[in-house]
Structure formats: structure tokens, C-alpha cells
Amino acid sequence: MSNDNQARPSAGSVREVGRYPLDLTGPHSHTLIIHPGVGSLSIGPSHLWKKADLHVAPDAVIDWTVFDAFATPAGSPWPRFLHYSGSDTGFLDWAQKRPIEEMTWSPVLSADMVVDASQSILHGLHIELGESIERLTLKLPQRPFRLNVSGDLSRFLATGDMPSSLALAPHTSRRKNDPSFILPGLGELHQVTSLTLHNAPLGQPISLSCLERFPNLDSLSLWGNFCDMDLLARHAGLTNLELRFIPDLADLSSLDTWPLLDRFIAYNVEETVGKRLRQQMKARAKTRPWTDYASVSQLRKPEWWMTEFGRPFSSWPKRQAKLANEAFKVAQATLAQARSFADAEAAITAFTMRFNTLKGIETTEREDLGEAVWQLSQSHHLIGQPITEEMAQGWFDAARDY
């Protein structure tokens, strides 16, 4: 790799694992460590991404061309997958000459921003929008690409050529009993033909009333909890329909509502409607064979959803998740015998303190534990009065060191 008296290596000349000094934000500002078989690279501030490969301040100006020297053993540009948190948009200029296979960007904005990606070569772009109030407007690439937007979608607008596919994962609450989530307006993006909506299986449901804004859809994929399923019938022109991890399909219309379907997938869906869909799928095949793919699989009973998704530890490492679930079960059993608020406080306090000595409790894990405490407060007990959310949260805050 280069030093102060040597020219930068030629494009694609570095293909070996090892340690390399980088002039990322200044002369030899960083050291890049390339591990065998790793095709991704994450760049971001240490307070947000402690496990980032390269730490940079959110407002740092980055020389993205330092990566021109790197290639995979097969000769394609390295890194293949980039994850970046910050405000520097220079990667879009860089991508005009050096294509990016997959880019995940978490914008850190101090003001509203208009970003021009119209000339960039991006095969896939994922934008993760946090909780700030600044808005991002993106001029979309002119080449076909996949766009994925997650978080606070009300902060995002896009103009220009439509992506080949659009995936949206709005920030919804964890409470399945909350009023349904209404997707905000997305301007020109309503003209896409291929849409995927992501939600938690037991989170706040997303209303499918939003689909009336997407008149051109021929492909739709739904993941998680939704309501107003009957409104899908208004999109009779769909050729592809995919339903995954959906606990309630009671209002779904019969498959013959979509006579043009070539592809249909129902995977990890509730059992009752799933069996009906299997029959409809087989019946359709007799009159018009499926030309692409059709499958209804992994039908689930009601209790499966609570076991798999009801508790907030599903994203934890396996060992920590096991400990958390065991502690939850103990607290739930103790609460079932509680006859006073003092008994309930003792159970929730013991649960909370169990994690004071557990490593790796960061903001996300603390929020998960707060959700678990709320679930415990709603579980069965013998007090005769409800445990309020404020009461349970107070016990949680008083007992935790994280």
C-alpha cells in the first residue's frame, strides 16, 4: 500500500487480505483490515456504530476514491457492500465512475438536503432514516436499481426515474393494538410497479389503504402485520403476490381475485387461511397452470406467533436471548401470584436487575427490555387493578444500571 513517497496503487491492484493505511479523511487517517471472504465494509461514527470497520465523524469529508485500489480475488470492485452513517454524499459522485453493488446509507443531517444520484451507478440503495426532523430529497439514478427506504418515511421524497423495485420499512410501534399505521405520501415513488412493505409480525399493523396511491403495481410483497387486507382486491392486475410472516389473513380475498397471477407465495402465515389458500392454489392450477412459482408453506398456529415474535429478544445473540427469555418466564410466573403492587414491583425489579451485570446492553437492548417490562405489566396477576405503563416504567428505571 502507499506511503508518503509512493503513488497510490492502481485501480483494482490490491486483492489480498491484510492491513492497509488509508487516506480516508486525511493522510494515513485510518487503517483498513481486510479479512478472508469479507465483501462488506461499514463506515460511521463510533458512538453510533461501535462495530464499524472504519470510524469517522458524522460530518467528516471522505475521499471515497481510496477504495479504487481494492478488488475481490475475482477482480470485481471491493467492497461489494458499503454501509455508511454520516452526511458526506461524495459516494454518489464516486459511483458515477465506480459502480456500487449495494449501498446502505444512514444520513446524519443538520439541515434539509437535496441529493443528486441521477448519474450514479447503484445496483441497490438502502436509506435508513433516523429520528431527526431534517428531510432528504433524492434525485433518483437514471439506471435501473433497487431502492429500499426504512425508518421515518415522512422525511423522504424522491424525484426522477423510478427504481426497478421499491421496498419500504416504516418505523411502527411494537404494539399490535395501536391504531393502524398510515403510510405517508411519497410523491413520484407512487408510480413504481414493484413494491415490498416490511413490518414486524406482531407490531402496529400497517393499513393497506396506502396501496390506492400505487396505481401501477404488478408485483406486491408483504412481510409482517397488516390490516385492511380486503383492499388488496382493488389490485386485480397483480402478476406477483407474496405474503410472508403474516399472523392474520382473515380478510384476504380468494386467489381468483387476481386472475393474472403467475407467481404466488404464502410463507409463515396463519394456519386457517393458509389451508384455504392451498386449496385455491391447486384449483387455479387446473384451469390455468402457474407459469412461474406458487407455494403455500409453513402454516402457523396462533401460539407460534407469540413464541417466535411476542417477546422483544428475537434479534439478540442466541445466548443472551436464552437468558432473557428465561428471566422473562420467571418474572411472568412470579407476577401471576402477585396480590399487591409491592409484589409486582419486586417481580419487575428482579427481572430488570438481572441485566445489570450482562454485557452488551446498549440503547437497542434497553428499549427491548423496556418493552418486555411493559409486556410483563400486562400479563396475568391477582392484584385486582391494572399495572399502568408509567408505574412499570418507573420500577424499571429505578432498578436498571444500563
Image (tube, rainbow, N blue to C red):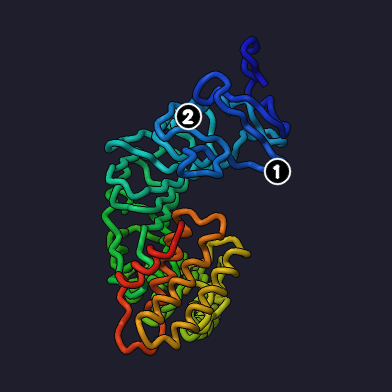
Q: Position of residue 330 (x, y in %)?
A: 53, 79
Q: Quadrant of residue 285?
A: bottom right
Front tag of 1 and 2: 1
Q: Amino acid at mark 1?
A: Gly
Q: Quadrant of residue 161?
A: top left
Nearer the observer, 238 or 187: 187
Q: Position of residue 276 (x, y in %)?
A: 48, 85
Nearer the observer, 53 or 289: 53
> Left or right: 122 with respect to 216?
right
Q: Secondary structure at mark 1?
A: loop
The residue positioned 34% from the left and 58% from the top of the image is 216
- What residue sits right under mark 1 in the picture? 37
- What residue sits right under mark 2 in the picture? 96
Sequence-wise, the earlier of marks 1 and 2 is: 1
CA–CA distance in space, label 1 to label 2 = 26 Å
Quarter occupied by the N terminus: top right
Tell me the number on the disc at residue 300.
none
> Left or right: 190 with respect to 27?
left
The residue positioned 54% from the left and 73% from the top of the image is 327
Above or below for 129 versus 355: above
Q: Work out which residue is located at the far top of the displayed protein and give it.
A: 5
Q: Amino acid at mark 2?
A: Gln
Residue 290 appears in the picture as rendered: no
The residue positioned 48% from the left and 83% from the top of the image is 334
Q: Residues within 10 Å of mark 1 (few under 14, many from 20)?
A: few
Q: Secondary structure at mark 2?
A: loop
Nearer the observer, 183 or 57: 57
Q: Residues within 10 Å of mark 2 (few under 14, many from 20)?
A: some
